[in-house]
Image (cartoon, rainbow, N blue to C red):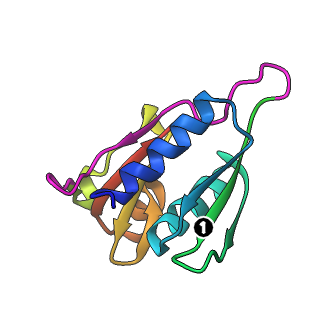
Amino acid sequence: MTTDPIADYLTRLRNAIQARKKVVEVPASNLKKDITRILYDKGYILSWKTEEDGKQGLIKIALKYDARTRRNAITELTRVSSPGLRQYAHVDELPRVINGLGVAIISTSKGVVTDKEARALNVGGEVLCFVS
């Protein structure tokens, strides 16, 4: 059992990207589904679906590569908040990733949203990770 499931999720994605895999499977949870939904909505992955495996279920993620240059859409995944040191940000202090080109994923009272959506909702929260 991992002590930080979000870090495990991001590491599985980074390893699959490095190995040039087309599909990666990760154990499912509601928070991971929300993060995957954001990655899909922002165009970082091709598709995703959930499958039941008799335990907690799986999330199958199809990674997105450029056909010409064969580079992945995700260049960097960084975990910000960890179980040992939670990182919270007020709405006025929400981080910008690569001056707005990347996405910060924030867990708020309104659900898991991007930094731009959190500013629009006028809420702060726990900064989970950066994606660029």
| Residue 25 part of the magenta-drawn span | no
Decide if residue 103 is in sight here: no
Decide if residue 4 is in sight here: yes
Q: Residue at x 40, y 77 (%)?
A: 110
Q: Position of residue 130 (x, y in %)?
A: 41, 43
Q: Residue at x 67, y 31 (%)?
A: 72
Query: Helix, strand or loop at disc 1?
Result: strand
Q: Which residue range is magenta in the image?
A: 67-87
Q: Quadrant of residue 6?
A: bottom left
Q: Residue at x 30, y 51 (%)?
A: 94
Q: Is residue 27 above or below residue 92?
A: below
Number of marks in the rendered image: 1
In this view of the protein, which residue sits in the foreground, 127 or 13?
Answer: 13
* Residue located farthest toward the right when viewing the structure as drawn: 67
Mark 1, Cα crowd under 10 Å, few <14 / some 14-19 / many 20+, is: some
Q: Amino acid at mark 1?
A: Leu
Q: Main secondary structure of the magenta part?
A: loop
Which image quadrant: the N terminus? bottom left
Q: Position of residue 80 (x, y in %)?
A: 29, 45
Q: Is residue 76 above or below residue 7?
A: above
Q: Is residue 117 left or right of residue 79?
A: right
Q: Position of residue 8 (x, y in %)?
A: 41, 50
The residue carrying mark 1 is 58
Q: Is residue 79 left or right of residue 98?
A: left
* Residue located farthest toward the top when viewing the structure as drawn: 69
Q: Residue at x 85, y 28 (%)?
A: 67
Q: Position of residue 131 (x, y in %)?
A: 48, 42
| Residue 86 part of the magenta-drawn span | yes
Q: Is residue 58 above or below residue 110?
A: above
In this view of the protein, which residue sits in the foreground, 29 or 108?
Answer: 29
